[in-house]
Amino acid sequence: MVKVVGIIQPVETKELSAEGESYADARAALEAQVPEGWRLLQILTK
């Protein structure tokens, strides 16, 4: 008998936003919002 294990991740996307006095502050605030098990895929500045 062969047992296989797969790891999956959701296909769902979600947009987060954050602000800060500097790019570093804003990025840290954004990263703090990312839920466990999710990855930050892209950061855009506005």
Image (cartoon, rainbow, N blue to C red):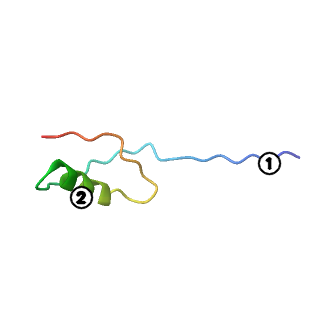
Residue pictured at 43% horizontal, 60% vertical: 36
What percent of the width, then of the height, locates residue 20? 14, 56
What percent of the width, then of the height, locates residue 35? 38, 59
Residue pictured at 51% horizontal, 47% vertical: 9
What percent of the width, then of the height, locates residue 7? 60, 47
- Tell me which numbered mark, 2 or 1, is placed earlier along the sequence: 1
Q: Residues within 10 Å of mark 1 (few under 14, many from 20)?
A: few
Query: Is residue 17 visible to us here?
Result: no
Q: Amino acid at mark 1?
A: Lys
What percent of the width, then of the height, locates residue 10? 47, 47
Q: Amino acid at mark 2?
A: Ala
The one nearer the camera, 27 or 18, is 27
Tag 2–tag 1 contact (CB < 8 Å): no
In the rendered view, does 31 fall on the left or right side of 2? left
Circle 2 or circle 1, nearest the eye: 2
Q: How far apart in space, not on screen, are marks 2 and 1 (Cα)?
A: 41 Å
Query: Is residue 26 visible to us here?
Result: yes
Q: Secondary structure at mark 2?
A: helix
Which quarter shows the C terminus?
A: top left
Q: Secondary structure at mark 1?
A: loop
In the rendered view, does 11 fall on the left or right side of 5? left
Residue 29 numbered tag: 2
In the rendered view, does 7 fall on the left or right side of 26? right
Residue marked by disc 1: 3
